[in-house]
Image: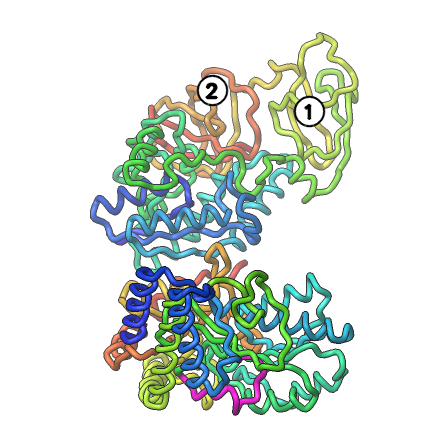
């Protein structure tokens, strides 16, 4: 096959491309430039946008002896991922930008262009298994990324090759070291690549400005504090509330809901976070649903047994065990064991 | 590299390793190295119609451009603090462009980017008008001999004459021109001229500034003052020798190469226009580098075209890329009034002394399908 390997400059995509070359495919490497201003060597080193990453990616291509190009997707990334991220928070939801980037950039913009240029599929270094169109969890549960890939349609999965699903992260690093890749011991990326300093609240404040409002006790209705912007809060959050009135029971309080129009943040006790039914929109089904399955409601979150009711417009999930802190905007991904059955967005 | 230049470099490296000669040392080995450098200086000067004392060897075309632009600017301002204005064509190479921008942001230079016509050519009346705005505040004029992207040759002698009327130093980046065009520094009237070895079959990592004997220039690099006290640093003797041999041969062969390359290039242009009827030829119709052809292919992304042609063994170039490798729409095309989309759809085809008709055949055969495919791969207009 003619394959286009997306090389982020990290260890996973490097080994994925190497395995594709080993398998005898005709591989071309491409680095996606996602930041409009990769100004400094270090600014994006936690994510995927720095000059250093571009160089690391090109060195991997050198070692593999494959052609290498840089594609400028900064404008699309800004519109489809960064602006969406800000708009979702402004609307009181909690988006997952990695999922969105997979959905809109890697497996739409890049895949479409690759197919149009005559490639058969795109290779990435995601940790998930993909065999005969069936997406499953990686053998390395701690690194599993099937959750952020479940949003891909069957057509997108048909144009995707994921060579790393049967390898653990230590095995990937060992494979990189054995090949002499300089990125073998490069640290994992964390957090959000376009917020290099990790300060999400500060990033949102700089984009949305101060929007002060009340923090309200959900049980008593009393105003127990003030905030500078409801967008800075996520359901389930405990820290950073700066409450001026202690709880009657003396126990910690958590964010129960965020209402952007009235700029109200509601707080309450931990048990008020527990939900056993979850409404979802924009469902995508990969396989017929068995009578019972499991659901994961956030990246690296717990799984819950669940029953699904609904149709092509939306699902109502009934959980066997309560889930704590389910935030609108996150993905609900259904599994049968390790196999991904479908995904939807928590409403 | 030209085989003769490669042989010279190899021999000189062997000799230098054996003698460990440093051209600035006074002992016998140093004198031998010095002799190689001085003979190279004489040969290069003869090839270019310059005097040996006007040759300042350095490490690259970029260094030479920076030395000319910054060094002459500093010297002119030191002589008269009113002189801070730089007149530069809008289509300069980044080695000049960014040096000028640096003077503007760090040293208080003011800049007039001189507008070019749709073919990328600077007309002397544009320069004349820019000088006339205040003839006394101009530090220098810098206009390239021929454009590296679209191949347009500038009327350098005519422009230099305008500057000379006002006693303003004139620098020209001739990196693309040596070996492709007839370059006679003395006859051209330029005060400073940049060249680099690898563009005419010489070694990498060596260049020169031809600097008129009475042109004041403040050094960029301070130290031993090896090159006329304008440039310090021990010279790479073998590279300097290779540069001189390549320059001598390139200048000797230039008329024949010009004839052969321009015929081949004209064939390429005609056949590309027939194969892809909506292709747009950018740059000059006459007075153009003989090995240069440059097209826009509307509806395509230049980097898609490059990827597809590369996969078929045809090597072409898009415009410049930033340090992360992201293709940028060419400032040269934008200065010529080309729209940004069209600038992004452009490719440069360069022919050199090893190019053959078979190369043109391979390109013309591959191109229609490649353009068709690249067009399908272009991102849809945004909602």
Badge 2: how crowded within 10 Å, few (<14), some, or many (20+)? many
Q: Position of residue B97 (x, y in %)?
A: 58, 70
Q: Nearer the viewer, residue B110 or A89?
A: B110
Q: Position of residue B207 (x, y in %)?
A: 46, 71
Q: How many marks?
A: 2
Instruction: Assign a secondary structure to mark 2.
Output: strand
* Residue at x-position 69% and y-position 61%: B106
Identify the image quadrant of the C terminus of chain A. Answer: top right
Q: Position of residue B226 (x, y in %)?
A: 52, 67
The boundaries of the magenta stretch are: B180-193
* Residue at x-position 26% and y-position 42%: A19
Quarter of the rendering containing residue B316? bottom left
- Name the residue that disc number 1 marks: A240
Q: Label 2: chain?
A: A
Q: Considering only order in the chain, which callout, 1 or 2, is on the residue closer to the N terminus? A: 1
Mark 2 vs mark 1: give the one in front.
1
């Amino acid at each position: 096959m003619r394959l286009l390997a997306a090389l982020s400059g990290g260890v996973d995509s490097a080994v994925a491309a190497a395995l594709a070359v080993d398998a005898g495919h005709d591989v071309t490497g491409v680095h996606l430039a996602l930041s409009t201003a990769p100004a400094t060597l270090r600014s994006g080193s936690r994510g995927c946008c720095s000059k250093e990453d571009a160089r690391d990616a090109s060195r991997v291509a050198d070692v593999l002896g494959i052609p290498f190009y840089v594609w400028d997707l900064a404008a699309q990334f800004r519109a489809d991922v960064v602006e969406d991220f800000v708009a979702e928070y402004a609307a009181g939801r909690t988006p997952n930008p990695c999922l969105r980037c997979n959905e809109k950039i890697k497996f739409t913009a890049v895949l479409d262009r690759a197919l149009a240029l005559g490639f058969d599929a795109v290779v990435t270094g995601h940790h998930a298994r993909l065999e005969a169109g069936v997406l499953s969890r990686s053998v390395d549960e701690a690194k599993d990324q099937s959750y952020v890939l479940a949003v891909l349609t069957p057509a997108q999965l048909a144009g995707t090759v994921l060579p790393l699903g049967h390898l653990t992260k230590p095995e990937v690093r060992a494979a990189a070291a054995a090949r002499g890749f300089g990125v073998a011991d490069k640290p994992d990326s964390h957090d959000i690549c376009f917020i290099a300093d990790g300060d999400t609240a500060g990033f949102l404040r700089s984009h949305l400005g101060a929007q002060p409002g009340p923090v309200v006790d959900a049980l008593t209705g009393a105003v127990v504090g003030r905030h500078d912007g409801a967008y800075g809060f996520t359901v389930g959050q405990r820290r950073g509330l700066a409450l001026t009135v202690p709880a009657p029971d003396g126990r910690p309080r958590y964010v129960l809901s965020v209402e952007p129009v009235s700029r109200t943040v509601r707080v309450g006790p931990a048990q008020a976070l527990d939900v056993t039914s979850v409404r979802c929109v924009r469902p995508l089904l990969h396989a017929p649903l068995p009578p019972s399955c499991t659901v994961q409601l956030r990246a690296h979150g717990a799984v819950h047994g669940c029953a699904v009711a609904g149709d092509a417009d939306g699902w109502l999930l009934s959980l066997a065990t309560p889930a704590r802190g389910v935030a609108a905007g996150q993905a609900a991904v259904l599994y049968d064991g390790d196999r991904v059955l479908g995904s939807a967005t928590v409403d | 590299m030209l085989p003769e230049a490669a042989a010279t470099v190899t021999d000189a490296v062997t000799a230098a390793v054996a003698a460990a000669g440093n051209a600035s040392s006074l002992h016998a080995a140093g004198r031998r190295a010095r002799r190689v450098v001085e003979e190279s200086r004489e040969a290069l000067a003869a090839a270019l119609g310059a005097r040996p004392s006007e040759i300042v060897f350095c490490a690259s075309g970029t260094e030479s451009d920076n030395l000319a632009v910054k060094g002459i600017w500093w010297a002119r301002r030191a002589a008269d603090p009113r002189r801070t204005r730089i007149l530069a064509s809008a289509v300069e190479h980044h080695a000049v462009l960014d040096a000028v921008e640096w003077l503007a942001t760090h040293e208080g230079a003011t800049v007039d980017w001189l507008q070019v016509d749709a073919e990328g050519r600077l007309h002397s009346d544009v320069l004349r008008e820019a000088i006339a705005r205040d003839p006394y505040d101009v530090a220098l004029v810098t206009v390239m001999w021929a454009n590296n992207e679209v191949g347009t040759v500038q009327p350098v002698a005519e422009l230099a004459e305008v500057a000379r009327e006002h006693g303003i130093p004139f620098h020209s980046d001739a990196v693309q021109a040596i070996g492709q065009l007839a370059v006679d520094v003395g006859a051209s009237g330029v005060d400073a001229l940049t060249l680099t070895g690898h563009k005419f079959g010489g070694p990498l990592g060596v260049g020169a500034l031809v600097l008129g004997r009475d042109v004041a220039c403040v050094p960029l690099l301070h130290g031993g003052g090896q090159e006329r006290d304008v440039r310090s640093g021990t010279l790479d003797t073998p590279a300097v020798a290779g540069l001189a041999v390549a320059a001598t041969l390139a200048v000797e062969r230039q008329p024949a190469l010009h004839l052969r390359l321009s015929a081949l290039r004209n064939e390429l242009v005609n056949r590309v226009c027939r194969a892809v009827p909506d292709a747009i030829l950018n740059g000059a119709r006459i007075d153009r580098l003989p090995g240069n052809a440059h097209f826009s292919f509307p509806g395509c992304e230049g980097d898609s075209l490059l990827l597809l042609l590369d996969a078929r063994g045809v090597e072409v170039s898009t415009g410049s890329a930033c340090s992360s490798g992201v293709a940028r729409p060419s400032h040269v095309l934008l200065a010529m009034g080309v729209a940004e989309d069209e600038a992004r759809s452009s490719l440069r085809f360069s022919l050199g002394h090893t190019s053959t008709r078979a190369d043109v055949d391979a390109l013309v055969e591959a191109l229609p399908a490649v353009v068709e495919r690249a067009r399908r791969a272009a991102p849809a207009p945004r909602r």
